[in-house]
Amino acid sequence: MIQFTEVYKAYPSGKEALRRINLFIEQGAMVFITGRSGAGKTTMLRLIGLIERHSRGQIIVNSQNLERVTGNRIALFRRSIGFMFQDHRLLNDRTVFDNVALPMVVAGHSYQETRKRVHAALDKVGLLAQEKSFPLALSGGEQQRVGIARAVVHRPAILLADEPTGNLDPALSWESMKLFEQFNQIGVTVVIASHDLEMIRKLKKSIVTLKSGKLLTAGGEAEE
Amino acid sequence: MNKRRNRNGVTDGFNYKMKVWLSQHNQAFQDSLGQLQRNLAGNLFSIAVIGISLALPAGFYLLLDNAQKVMENWDGTIQIALYLHPEVSDERADTIKQELSGHALIEQVTLITKDQALQEYKQFSGFGDALDALEENPLPSMLLLQPRTEVITTEQGEALLEELGKLPEVETAQFDRQWVKRLIVILHILKRAVVILSTFLSVAVLLIIGNTIRLSITNKRHEIAINKLFGATNAFIQRPFLYSGLIYGIAGSALAWMLLILSTAIMKDPVNQLATLYNSEFRLSGLNAFELLILIVIGGGLGLFGSWIAVGRHIRDTEPT
């Protein structure tokens, strides 16, 4: 569950990225955040993942008031979240296996458990055969799927994806979205920031629309 | 077994947690070795600088330690010579010897009677025939006193000499220890210099290790941020860097030890030759096992501390973007 109550986010320069956001996302929902560039989509994901702090208001994620999550509790909180970025953010000097294993390793899982889950995640995204490859030897689409496997390998309660299809062709984008949908079907709350309205329409999922940091619509499906 | 699975599927329980903790340390150690291997030439250069920086104070320590051993040998040969009046008989001299043997500050007393003195003089002077011509033995009896070691360089030594010089049978009391006092003062000065030098070089080692680790952190900012994004704690991220510092320090100590072995081997023969010329049993010695352990602990400790200083702030400041 994700709840924003009267949330504001302002930067030291004075620029307001988000203004008076009130939003509720149910546990197990799949929600798209849309809007033009600079609307505040990425900022919203960053606030949910505690990459940034909000300036005013209250954010509750999985029953935790984010204002009270400090110190080492930030690390523990982030273990319940899976992140997925447009630029993938893979470690190029590590193999595919090591990249995907990272959330398991930092959480202190045993090697046997890590191997089992990494193999399952790579199998799911169709990259098990490439587990020993390095990211730079993979295509953009394959790198993106490695990013997806890493985002879900530790079975997060929430999956946050920022423009996950930005660099992909339509076929690959659709494939990725279907993967997100499958994770959502097993109970993961999926929040995706995207401006790919055509794709969102096809999936018929809830959307949140932002404009210049303000919430325009929340909860409805994208119109045809 | 006291085990249960938490929400994230991680098993709780002390034994399991300990196993995970050890496994994470093992992984951090392997990561550090991997990092060192990836930039082998640069890291070997850093280890060489650390090794030389540690070898210098350790070498001075060895020098002082050996000098101290030489001093201990010489301390045993420093004696007070009491020349008795010529009219003092050998019997009386022997009585004085017995009395002085019980003195608290004197370890040993040797009597050289008039006849013994004459025989020795004849033997070593080459004036045997001339001395035979003398009607009377002109040499006095002499008492050679071995004071306790702790008395030699203190005010007690002065007081003892004064006390002995006042004995009515004593004509002259001699205690040639000025050079020993000077040598001891020089050694004290050198000891202080070694402490100062060691402090400066320890700070240099800290800075070298700190800077090497800081550069390593700078090169890994992206990786640190990704790790934090997926829930790595600062302690988890720090570990490989701390192990790197520890490895730098221990490897530097090992190198310093090898340099000292080499230096000792080069100096051994000429020093031993010199000692033989002075009829001394002294032999140049290197670091013993305990001193080697101390060197490794100091090197490792400096490495760990240097990296700890470097990583703390940088890792805290590196956040996902």
Image (spheres, grey):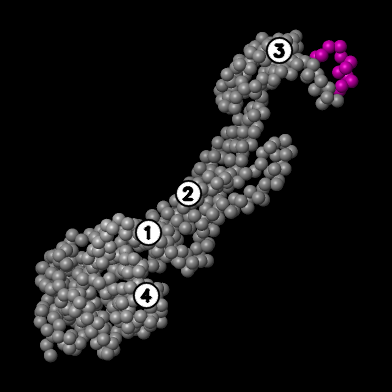
**Distance between the alpha carbons at the discs numbered 2 and 4:** 39 Å
Element carrying mark 2: helix
The mark nearer the N terminus, 2 or 1, is: 1
- Check whether the beta carbons of the residues at disc 4 and disc 3 lie within 8 A of each other: no
Residue beneath disc 1: B22
Chain designation of label 2 = B
Label 3 sits on residue: B93
Give the side of residue A67 with respect to residue B223, left or right.
left
The chain letter for the residue carrying disc 3 is B
Specify whether disc 2 shares its chain with disc 1. yes
Q: Which mark is residue A168?
A: none
Q: CA distance from mark 4 to mark 1?
A: 22 Å
Left or right: A23 with respect to B57? left
Residue position for label 4: A97
Task: Give residue A101's quadrant in the image.
Answer: bottom left
Classify mark 3: residues with Cα within 10 Å, few (<14), some (14-19) or many (20+). many
Of circles 3 and 1, the one toward us is: 1
Q: Position of residue A210 (x, y in %)?
A: 15, 78
> Which of A99 and A109 lies nearest the eye of the viewer?
A109
Residue designated by label 2: B298
